Image: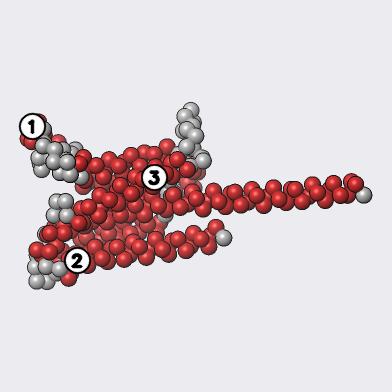
Amino acid sequence: MFNKQRKTNIALYVAMMFITLLSLYGLFLFLSIEQITFLAEEDGPIEWFGAFSLLLSAIFFFMSFRRSKRGNDFLFIKPQKNIFLLLLGLLMLFGFLEEISWGQRIFQVPTPAFLEEANNQREINIHNLKTFMGFPLNSNFLLTLFWLSFCCLVPVLYYLVPPLKRFFDRINLPIVPLFISFFFVLNYIVSIITPSLNQTDIIPISDVVEAKESYISFLFFIISVWHYDFLQIHQEAVYSSSSSLQTSLSEKDNIKSKSSAS
C-alpha cells in the first residue's frame, strides 16, 4: 500500500512539473516580445508565481517540521524534531520576502536613504545590494550553487556512496528525490536554449532568467509537498504496522489464555 501510493504520487508530481515547465517556457514561443516583457516584468505574473511558490514552500516545510517525529543526531546535539525542515522553511520564507522586497511595494514603503545608493534597484532587499553583485556573492550564483548541490549532488551521493548515505540518514537530512533533481537540470538546459528558439524576435535574457528562477521556486514547492506527504504516508504506515502487531499479540494472548483455561 505504501509503495503503491508513493508511485501514484510520483506520477502526479512529474505531471505537474512537466506541465508547468511547458507552460512557462511556452510563453516565449507563442507570445510577442511585448507580452513576454509584461509577464516577466517586476511585480509581474511570472515573478509573483515564483514568490507564492516560495511562500507555499515555507508553509509546507514548517508543517513538516511540526509533524516530524524523528529529530537529528549531531553527536552532542540531538533535537527532537528535524531541524533541517525548519531551516528550509526559514530559507523559503526569506526568499519570498526578498522577492516582494519585504512588502515595500505592497505597503508603499519609501526606500531609506542609505539603501538608495547601496541597492541597485533602490529597493528594500538584500539580494540587489551592490555588495552582492559580484562573484561569488551574486544571488543568481548562490541560487544555482544551492540547487545544484542540495537538490542534485547530495541525492546522487546519497544513492551512490554508502558511507554518505549512512551519514545523511544519521543526521536525518531531507533528501530530494532524483526525479525532482532531473527537472532542476532540465530547467537549466531549457533556459539556455530558449532564447534561440524564437526566430522572429530577440528574447530578452532577463525575461528567461525570471522564468527560470520562478520555476526553481516551483520545484522547491514540489519538494516541500513531497516531504510533507512522505511524513504523512510514512507515519500512517508505521501506525498501521504497529496496530497490526498489537492485534496479533492480543490474539496470541487470547489463545494462550484459552489453552491455560482448558
Q: Residue at x 63, y 51 (%)?
A: 241
What residue does disc 1 label? 113
Q: Residue at x 29, y 48 (%)?
A: 54
Q: Residues within 10 Å of mark 1 (few under 14, many from 20)?
A: few
138 above or below 205? Answer: above
Q: Earlier in the sequence, mark 1 or mark 2?
A: 2
Q: Looking at the picture, tell me which residue is in the foreground, 84 or 190.
A: 84
Q: Residue at x 40, y 56 (%)?
A: 178
In the image, residue 86 lies at what x, y percent?
39, 39
Q: Residues within 10 Å of mark 2 (few under 14, many from 20)?
A: some
Marks 2 & 3, CB-CB < 8 Å contact: no
Q: Is residue 83 left or right of residue 207?
A: right
What residue does disc 2 label? 27
In the image, residue 188 lies at what x, y percent?
25, 58
What residue does disc 3 label? 61
106 above or below 194? Answer: above
Regarding residue 41, the answer to whether it shows in the image is: yes
227 above or below 72? Answer: below
Gap in angstroms between the C-alphas marked 2 and 3: 30 Å
Regarding residue 153, the answer to whether it shows in the image is: no
Q: Is residue 95 left or right of residue 262?
A: left
Q: Is residue 262 left or right of residue 187?
A: right
Q: Looking at the picture, tell me which residue is in the foreground, 77 or 219.
A: 219
